[in-house]
Image: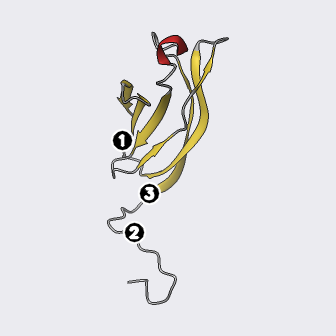
Amino acid sequence: NGCASMPCSFRRGARAGLRKTHIMIHSAFLEGMEPGFMDSRRPFVQLTTMDGETRQTMYGEWSSATNRWFWEEPLACEIGLEDNLHLAVHSRSGYDMLAFEF
């Protein structure tokens, strides 16, 4: 099984053809979600793969110069060429702001 000697690494249910990928989460304009409204609910981005693997950014930083939330943070995951990814923007308080798949 490939684990005859230690240390052993085994990933149950791994699919063939997966590649480690880094997806850069840069920024987002979230209308109506400026800091006056969002002071206690700073947004973060969550990435979910078809296998259910999730990664999330740190909380976003607001730029009043551009009226955008910034993360500038890569999220690493393993995906295949035919996989869909689900990206969602959430707030600390649990308020879901945006979600899409690609």
- Residue 19: x, y in percent? 49, 55
Q: Of the residues shown, which amino acid type is indicated by label 3?
A: Leu
Looking at the rendered structure, which numbered label has been put on residue 11? Answer: 2
**Which circle, 1 or 2, is nearer the viewer?**
2
Label disc, if present, on residue 84 of the rendered structure: 1
Among the two numbered marks 3 and 1 on one chain, the one whose residue lies closer to the N terminus? 3
72 sits to left or right of 80: right
- What quarter of the picture does the N terminus occupy? bottom left
Residue extending farthest right? 65
Say which amino acid is labelled 1: Asn
Q: Is disc 1 placed on a helix, strand or loop?
A: loop
Label 3 vs label 1: CA separation?
Answer: 13 Å
**x and y percent of residue 91 in the render?**
43, 28
Gap in Å between the C-alphas at discs 1 and 2? 21 Å
Which mark, residue 33?
none
Question: For this rendering, which residue is in front, 80 or 58?
Answer: 58
| Image quarter hosting the C terminus | top left
Dot 2 falls on a residue whose secondary structure is loop
Residue 6 in the image: state x and y as whole percent: 50, 86
